[in-house]
Image: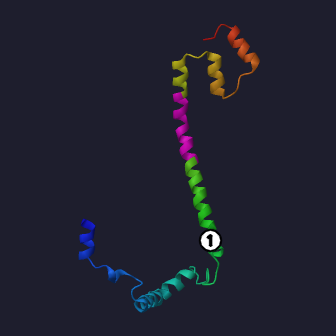
Amino acid sequence: MESDEVKGRIDLSALDPFSDPAARDALVARVLHRSAFELARRRRNGTGEVMWSAGASVLAVMAGWARPALAAAALAVLASAIALRTARPEQETALAGILEALAVPSPVEQWVEEERTPSTADLILTLEGGTAW
C-alpha cells in the first residue's frame, strides 16, 4: 500500500537514462571530452613514456602490474611468517601445560617435544619400564 503512494508522489522519470537518447549521448561525449587529458596522463609513466595505449590488451596492462603485485604478495608472506614465528612460543608453553595436566609418561613427553614418532622398541621399553599410565 505504502509503496503505491510513494510511486504516485515521486516522479523518477528524469533519472531514466534511456528516456532521451540525445541527452545521454551528449552527457557521454562531455564526460569523455573532459576526461581525455587525465586518461592520457594516466597512460604515461613518470618519465613520459606511454605505458599502455588505447589498443593495448587487458593482459598487457595487467602484466605491467605484475611486479608491484608480486612485491605486495612477498611482503604479505613475510609478515605472515613473522606473525607465526612470534606466536610459536605461546603454543609450546600451552603444550607443556597440556602434557602436565594429562600426566603422560616422561618418554612420551620427550617424543612430543622432539616431534618424532616413537619406534616399536620405544613403545615396548616404555610399557615394560613401568612408566605406563
In the displayed structure, would residue 52 be above or below residue 84?
below
Residue displayed at 50% across by 88% down = 36
Magenta-drawn stretch, dominant element (helix, strand or loop):
helix
Q: Mark 1 sits on what residue?
A: 62
**Viewer-proximal residue, 21 or 130?**
21
In the displayed structure, would residue 120 be above or below residue 85?
above
In the displayed structure, would residue 89 be above or below residue 33?
above
Q: Quadrant of the C terminus?
A: top right
The local secondary structure at tag 1 comes to helix
Give the x, y percent position of residue 120: 75, 18
Give the x, y percent position of residue 37: 49, 88
Write down the quadrant of residue 122 in the picture. Answer: top right
Residue displayed at 23% across by 71% down = 5
**Viewer-proximal residue, 88 or 43?**
43
Residue displayed at 57% across by 79% down = 45
Instruction: Say left or right for 82 vs 18.
Output: right
Residue displayed at 65% across by 75% down = 60
Instruction: Say left or right for 13 vs 94.
Output: left
Give the x, y percent position of residue 78: 59, 51
| Residue 132 inside the magenta-drawn segment | no
Magenta-highlighted residues: 81-94
Colour setting:
rainbow
Residue type, label 1: Met
